[in-house]
Amino acid sequence: MTMERRALFWIGGLIVCAVLVHLLSSILLPFVAGMLTAYFLDPVADRLEERRVPRGIATALILLTFFIVAVGIMTLLFPLLHGQVLELMHLLPGMVEAARAAIEPTLRDLIAGLPPDALAEIRNSVGDFAGRAARWITSLIGDIWSGGLALFNLISLLVVTPVVAFYLLRDWDLITAKIDSWLPRGSRETIRQQLGEIDTTLAAFVRGQASVCLALSVIYAVGLTAVGLKSGLLVGLGAGFISFIPYLGAATGLVVGTGIALFQFSDWLPIAIVIGIFLFGQTMESYVLTPRMVGDRVGLHPVWIIFALMAGGALFGFTGILLAVPMAAVIGVLLRFAISRYLQSPLYDGGADGEN
């Protein structure tokens, strides 16, 4: 098989896989969640297996402990979060009214200085924007309901994910060995090397970033609760949870937390403390948590991660968001490999080495 036919074969295979993921994205969520759970817990199973614990028993113990801890945490947090969600919903109308009262005089002075034609154009633009925003929100709610959080999909996520995780974790070594036996003999070592790079990148990011998000959730939640911020636990946990998207967690938490603090406190000291908590968390993430827990071996630029998450969500919904970082890691490793081969090829130096 020529090089061109090999390239067409692999490109065709990738296209078929992408089309299948797109067509089946509405039912893939529990399988992707189970696969990520198995990948996350595989090192623990390997360590127990090294201590002569049978793989099946080790898998059952690990998953049972994992889900008991997860359910226990949710059971403890749900009543608190439920109360804080209701509290935040109660605060929102007052916050909106306070913001309107603060901005209205400035807007009134600004509008008074505008000519009638410009004022009419602004009103039309605002109306068009409001209509588009309403349609977008309605479409988003419909996509969420049909794409991942509908009752059937939620039940399947709770029921199917543990089953998928169990079988994948139990047979992980067998699956990887079988896939390894299918690799082309002529390129086996090269493919193994790139798969090792992908595994290193994924392990460093997924497991490391999960630890970073957990640490930030604790920092934000404890700090905001200690200050006495209303819905502080909800804001802190939410900001920490979405911190896997670079800078989004701290920025979102800073805006929401500061807005609540401005509405709640009359003194500037607690407001400054709320701002300081998020600045401290972001500083800890940048200079302590990420270097120690993720390291510099990931090779995933923050802009590339943000693009991958947005592209995955736009193409495949919530399933695409789960697949975004693994696919970004795969593409990043393959691109670095392709660039290294290109720099060693005549396409880069124009055949200068051969001429000399």
Image (tube, helix red, strand yellow):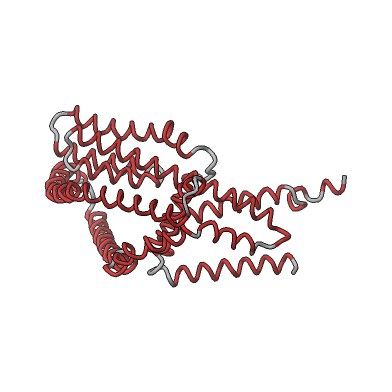
In percent of the image, x 55 and y 46: which residue is there?
A: 200
- Image height check: is 112 above or below 225? below
Q: In which image quadrant can residue 157 be found?
A: bottom left
Asked if residue 70 lies left or right of residue 328, the reply is left
Asked if residue 49 lies left or right of residue 73, the reply is right
Residue 254 horizontal/vertical position (percent)? 28, 39
Q: Residue furthest top?
A: 269
Which quarter of the image is occupied by the N terminus? bottom right
Which one is in front, 48 or 93? 48
- Image height check: is 321 above or below 263? below
In percent of the image, x 47 and y 51: which residue is there?
A: 42
Which quarter of the image is occupied by the C terminus? top right
Which one is in front, 10 or 267? 10
Residue 286 horizontal/vertical position (percent)? 42, 34
Which one is in front, 36 or 260? 36
Total number of numbered discs in the rendering: 0
Asked if residue 288 lies left or right of residue 88, the reply is right
Residue 71 horizontal/vertical position (percent)? 27, 52
- Image height check: is 231 above or below 287? below
Q: In which image quadrant can residue 9 be found?
A: bottom right
Q: Residue furthest right?
A: 356
State whether residue 208 appears in this view.
yes
State whether residue 304 appears in this view.
no
Asked if residue 335 lies left or right of residue 115, the reply is right
Residue 180 horizontal/vertical position (percent)? 62, 59
Which one is in front, 108 or 137? 137
